[in-house]
Image (cartoon, rainbow, N blue to C red):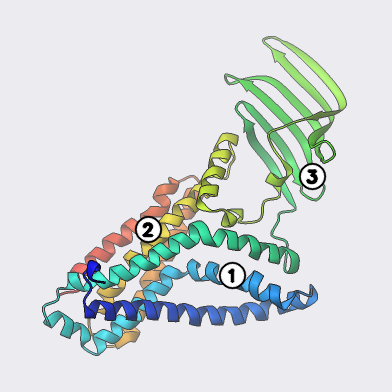
Amino acid sequence: MRFLGLKIIDIYIIKKFLGTFFFAIIIIISIAIVFDVAEKVEDFLEKEAPFRAIAFDYYLNWIPYFANLFSYLFTFIAVIFFTSKLAANTEIIAILSSGVSFKRLMYPYFLSALVIAIMSFVLMAYIIPPANVIRKDFEYKYIKSPIRNTDKNIHRQIEPGVFIYMKSYNTTNDVGYKFSIEKFEEGVLKSKLISDYVKWDTSISKWSIRNYYIRDIDSLSEKITTGSRVDTTLNMFPKEFKLMKNHTEIMTLPELNEYIEQQYMKGADNVVELLIDKYQRFAYPFSTFILTLIGVSLSSRKVRGGIGMHIGLGLGLSFSFILFMRFTTMFAISGSMNPLMAVWLPNIIYTIISIYLYRLAPK
């Protein structure tokens, strides 16, 4: 520990911080599992889910997902709880009286927050997505289908200058109804196909377009072609319409980046949601430092009301932080705000608040 410049008091605070953090996670997760089992026990019994699958395929993969989902809140509660106890026992006063500055006191806190932030980022970017594949597969078999049965009003670009439209798509039989293809050159419509429906033919791995007519436009002249069936290859596949709900949860960060590029090229309308998901994987771990600083600044002073007062103030701030994140995300989805700004704006504002509280704390 010498290379980190740690002293005995630093190790003491780190142990308290991380110990309280993991203890809070264990307690909350244990309670959550009890309620979740009570809610889903009928599904388990009705579908005859094996105990091994329930324990290892579902809950073993559900625990890291749930723990990371609220890790920043657990961090905040841990900081508030054990720092308030230190303040109530006048240990904070003793540390500061020994010549340790408040700035130096933050070092073990930030070191602990760094451990939690790195752990949270690695979980979100690389570990939880593969675990979600197993968990969602269990849900599909024994609880409820996480796959959408139909999509409506699908409009997307499948390659540069080529757009497709379907009024609806049924994932059960891989049929898209009221199907059309438009081809543009330099922004000018050159060809348009309209059909009753399109169906994926598994025997030839092609799309079969039924009851169609095609308008080929050349300057002022048009050519009309009709037919009952034509088989063709299109840059789209049935699996794209069978995505799980919240399907980005099963994508690692590299996979998500690749998927975003594909959706950009196709002109998909869900790019903003994908970008929000990507930016959140960086912003959420960073919020660990902000909430740690706020927690220490609020709870390091011994006040009338003790731990209860600190926890009340802390929870008020943390829930307002979560609520603010939800609001900015909604603005980004509606197109009123840039996705990057929407995700990072709460961090920016609460960083300013945390610095203000930090400056007040030593006084």
Residue at image point 32% right, 85% down: 307
Q: Is residue 300 left or right of residue 276?
A: left
Instruction: Give the Cα distance between marks 3 and 1.
Output: 31 Å
Q: Which residue is mark 2?
A: 346
Name which quarter of the figure residue 348 lies in.
bottom left
Which numbered circle lies on residue 62?
Answer: 1
Residue projecting furthest to the bottom: 89
The kind of residue on which mark 1 rests is Trp
Q: State the SS at label 3.
A: loop
Q: Which residue is mark 3?
A: 174
* Residue 185 vertical position relative to residue 1 in the rendered view, above or below: above
The kind of residue on which mark 3 rests is Asp
Residue at image point 38% right, 80% down: 19
Residue projecting furthest to the front: 2
First along the sequence among labels 1 and 2: 1
The kind of residue on which mark 2 rests is Pro
Name which quarter of the figure residue 318 lies in.
bottom left
First along the sequence among labels 3 and 2: 3
> Can residue 323 be seen here?
no
